[in-house]
Amino acid sequence: MTYPINYTVIGAGNGGRAMAAHLALMGKDVTLYNRTFSHIEVIAKRKGIELESYPGGPLGFGKLNKATSDIAEALEKAEIIMVVVPSSGHADVAKSIASYLKDGQIILLNPGRTFGAIEFDTTLRREGCKADVTVAEAETFIYASRADGPAQARIFRIKEAVPIAALPANKTEPVLKAIEDVYPQFIEGHDVLHTGLNNMGAIFHPALTILNAGRIESTHGDFEFYIDGVTPSVGYVLEALDRERVTVASAVGIRARTGLEWLELAYNVQGKDLREAIHNQSGYYGIKAPSTLSHRYIFEDVPMSLVPIASLGKQYGISVRAIDSIIRLACIIHQTDYYRTGRTVEKLGIKDLSISELNSYVKEGLPYHLA
């Protein structure tokens, strides 16, 4: 088959730079878009990004087609659009690109967090987009990376298997085939209910940060986040959150992985409970806590991960008291209303859908009378 050549990467942060450089080194024609040009000015002048990596990983100067803050220019020739921005920016990206999209383009959110593809699809429709495009999401970001300088990026690790799902799911296979020459690591993720409800960051990040709030503020994060931070009591809360997430998933027909199952799958570690399994993960040792409570573990993971799980659970009569308590504590700490800014069923466009209608939407697309 003939694989797509033209990629546009939206977002020039740690992940976007690494992805753009790597795609260029793999022979693709890459355009990097960032809404603030000063952030990519050096990249534009150098016409590329210097990529460093782990032993045996991708390495060298990734020559870009262009780096621009003009969205029309960025999308003009794009076949694959890789969105690499915080999930809190997905709706804004959808609004900004809606009128420039063309039939046949693929949009992949890296990652979607919880129901990013649903939010993106709903936003495009609300903006009047008529182009026949495919929106898909990754369950997690494929790279562990950082930006080392104004035109430099470093990749620490590339994940071996990352589930992705298109919306609707019957378009996942064409998406996988379109990108398999550059990303064979992407695998079938069933549907966006699976990728969204298997988001373990929703369980680990916000509660662990909030329950250690005093320690974070007094030490500026100078303790081991997953080791010192996961005491027996914190472990009990994480398990309660995890049970609610799995129950919400079950209510809509999804067999979600438990936290214990995820730790065994991802890191080959076990334990009699979640706390013990986390402490048995050697990779967690040495990871410091966030230095401040103004951190994406709260301002991104609460509205874009916990809120949609809670909102979906409430819609179908599932008790989400533990999740709701973490959301409400986050609202108090940040002096904001994350239920107002987050991905509720109303914002996602799935309010009042029956469970069968929801599953029909994620697998086959919205029925005509609901579109």
Image (cartoon, rainbow, N blue to C red):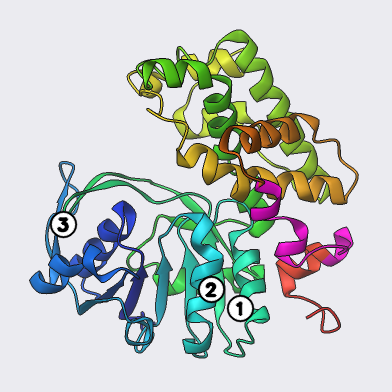
Which residue occupies the extreme front position in the image?
Answer: 335
Res. 94 mark: 2
SS at circle 3: loop
Reply above or below: 67 against 311: below
| Region rendered in magenta | 338-357
Residue 218 in picture, x, y percent from top left = 42, 15
The quarter of the rendered structure image containing the N terminus is bottom left
Instruction: Answer with left or right where residue 25 lies relative to residue 70.
Output: left
Residue 183 in picture, x, y percent from top left = 37, 61
Q: Does the magenta stretch include residue 202?
A: no
Check if mark 1's residue and mark 2's residue have beta carbons within 8 Å. Answer: yes
The residue pinned by badge 1 equals 124
Residue 110 in picture, x, y percent from top left = 45, 58
Residue at image x 40%, y 24%?
289
In the rendered image, is residue 280 in sight?
Answer: no
Residue at image x 57%, y 68%?
172
Q: Does the magenta stretch include residue 352?
A: yes
- Distance between mark 2 and mark 3 Cα atoms: 26 Å
The residue pinned by badge 3 equals 150
Question: How many discs mark residues in the rendered view?
Answer: 3
